[in-house]
Image (spheres, rainbow, N blue to C red):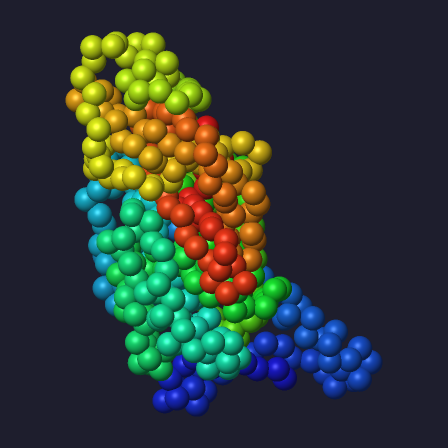
Amino acid sequence: AFYFNLGNLSPEYRSVINSIQLIALCRVPLIKKYGMNRILQPFMQDLHQLEAFTEADFQIRTRAIHDRHCRLVENDANLEATYGVKTRSVLNQSRYFHITDGLVLDVMHDQLEGVLPLEVKILLQKYIQEENYFTLEIVNDRLERLWYPQSDASNKPSPIKPQSLANNSMRISQSAARMWCLARMFPILIGDLIPQNDEHWENFLRLLKIEEIVFAPKATPQLAAYLGVLIEEYLEDYVNLNDRLPIPKQHYMVHYPNQIINVLYIKNTNEAVGRVTTVQEAGVEDELQEADPQTKGDSSLTRTSWVKVYGTKYVKGDVIVIDYHHGFPILGKIQKVLVVERHIVWFQYLKINVTEFVCHLNAFKVQQLNEIRYIKQSELLDYYPLGLVKGFGCYANQVFVTLKYRLDLMQ
């Protein structure tokens, strides 16, 4: 006879006879003839299905199943914990909305306050306490010295306290916004200290690719399918590398692709096509007239050190996204902020040359050029300003740009 019980049961329940489950019964002659492995093979096939990390391997809570659970709970309140339902939601009275298929993914709570803090903490524990690649003092020193883009200046990560790595919590004392900044800058922060092809590091980089998709303003069914592959690979490697089960917020990730398809962001095909103009040395007024013939010579022109457009702040030195070609962003560094007729925002910028994508740092290596160009803020490929970040160690003389999310679908 073959039996099993669940190791995560509390000790007081583990020894109870009802907690011991039967797997199979087999006669001794059959075991001698076919061997133990043949007898246990069907069990292992079932176990393999349970260990999978795709949405298809889990039962989805549909409207019919949810309604059935609600009816059962209404008849017996003790079943609330069994089905994870307390009562019917008044929102389901809508003709077009139901909570089982109308709720979208909650990336702030799932990722910024769940998965990312856990991953960063596990990596720091491994690299500091087990591998001795560096010390926590080095990490905090670099956190202080790192170049932070203007858009991330208010979200600069707090120093990581030693007790954060010693306790059993899944947090490292960062707010959601600071955690997102830390996660994106983490490869540049310590990447030079991590050996190439480190499996834990590779899986963290895979997680960052997942974040770049789920935070992107737009998506496609094809990208959602790719996201599903990334999530499955990430969760499988997480379990194998760390010898621990995923937390619930990691499990929620298997539903992301389907949720994205259900509430797919539709691309606006009527967007204006960005027009970039190269100009020669001249007065700014003349340059703007050359860049945009609709700008009249008597138009009022204001030079300012910064400007806010619909809540997004732009300052000199910000990196703006002009376009995206063949897997590389077209970038520029703001030199001047110009406002025409008090409402049309122009940027004078220096073109930035993107030389390569450094996979180990999940960042684009860049060089600043001296070519001056102009573009309207409304014609940027993406409104979110980025920044130049200097590397450490073997990357100390190099400058990088990290993206906040994927840009290839913004065109």
In this rendering, the count of numbered labels is: 0
Percent from the top left, x then y, of residue 113?
31, 61
- Name the residue located 51 percent from the left edge and 76 percent from the top edge: 133
Q: Which residue occupies the foreground of this view, 371 or 70?
A: 371
- Name the residue located 37 percent from the left edge and 43 percent from the top edge: 386
- Name the residue located 34 percent from the left edge and 41 percent from the top edge: 318
- Name the residue located 25 percent from the left edge and 27 percent from the top edge: 338
Judge from the rendering whether residue 85 lies leftward or rightward of residue 226; answer left or right: left
Q: Is residue 13 above or below residue 176?
A: below
Q: Quadrant of residue 215?
A: top left
Q: Is residue 2 above or below residue 212?
A: below
Q: Is residue 330 above or below residue 82?
A: above
Q: Which residue occupies the foreground of this view, 218 or 47?
A: 218
Residue 106 visible (yes or no): no
Residue 164 visible (yes or no): yes
Judge from the rendering whether residue 122 lies leftward or rightward of residue 348; answer left or right: right
Percent from the top left, x then y, of residue 303?
22, 28
Judge from the rendering whether residue 249 lies leftward or rightward of residue 23; answer left or right: left
Percent from the top left, x then y, of residue 399?
47, 51
Q: Is residue 358 above or below residue 33?
A: above
